Amino acid sequence: MHRVVVLLAAVLVALLAGCSSSGAVDGAEPAPTAVPGLSADLVQQRADVEARRIQVELTLDSGAAPLDVTGLQLRSAAFPGAAPTGRAAAGVQVLPGAAVDLAVDLGPPSACTAQEERDPGGESSPPLPATAVLALADGASAAVDLPDADRHLARAHAEACAVAAAAAVVPARWDPAWTTTGSGADLRAVGVLHLGPVAPGGTAALEGVGSTPLFHWHLPGGPVRLGAGQSADVAVVLEPARCDAHALADDKRGFGPQLQLSLDGAPAVPVRLWVPRPDRAVATGALVGACAGGP
């Protein structure tokens, strides 16, 4: 009997050793590995800001083998719901000596700090390193570090955190119906900003609206102050900031003004609120009309 027990123990040890040497339990996905010659980082172009996305830039050294990527996942505690889009989801080939940008929709922010909520420009935010996990055509996966060297992810996170913090105190949205006032060079677009209701126990003040490359945004009624539970419909007048055709044709931020919001008595923070794309025709027409009617 003792001999049988010893033999069974030896068999069990051999089986366990075999599992350990295989590097993975049956059915488990293999751990991502590094690809020689592959480097990456994060980039955010002007058009990415409104879309709330970021680009993972993959670069493959000259002399390396081409890399067939079938999918990409951004792993970041700052944006846990980030999802690939476009070529990042459909797949792409990275050639030696070339760089490829793959877009990722960031989704809602997580792990926001008080500093980010006060500094939506992210000027004082440190880089937010992340990891890109690539699904490869041969069934393997590869991991590559994203150092966020130029702080693109840090700035995107700070702005998203500021927007979320403001919305928790005072929701804000643009009314889809825009009107005009004046004529000729004095033609102006008029929008309505819906503010509130302010959260219980909170206060909010709209002290102004920042200019954009296309418009100066004016509050004809002056600053607006609201207490808990209060709401307001605020008229906002858009004055042309530029009349050159290039500014309108190449615009990326003209309809993304920053609301100067003071929340719960704190100093005002610039919080960006985009006018939805389908609702921009009236303001665009007023800009063109005013510029055409000027000297």
Image (tube, grey):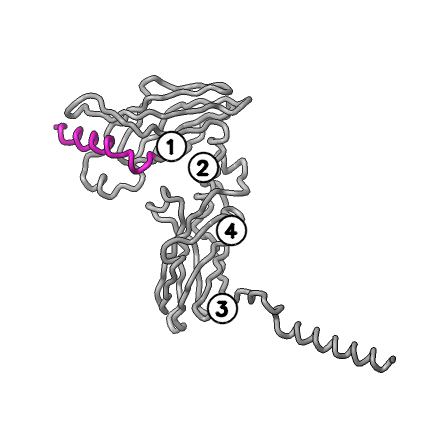
Give the SS element for disc 2. loop
| Marked residue nearer the N-terminal end (3 or 4) | 4
Question: The residue under label 4 is which amino acid type?
Answer: Ser
Give the magenta-colored segment's residue range: 275-295
Using a 10 Å C-alpha cutoff, classify the residue at mark 1 as few (fewer than 14 neighbours), some (14 to 19) or many (20 or more).
Answer: some
* Mark 2–mark 3 distance (CA, rounded to whole Å): 39 Å
Q: In the rendered image, which quarter contains the C terminus?
A: top left
Mark in the foreground, 1 or 3: 3
The answer to which of 75 and 37 lies nearer the viewer is: 75
* Mark 1–mark 3 distance (CA, rounded to whole Å): 44 Å
Numbered label attached to residue 258? 1
| Marked residue nearer the N-terminal end (1 or 3) | 3
The stretch drawn in magenta includes residue 19: no
Instruction: State the residue position of label 2.
Output: 120
| Marked residue nearer the N-terminal end (2 or 4) | 4
Instruction: State the residue position of label 3.
Output: 140
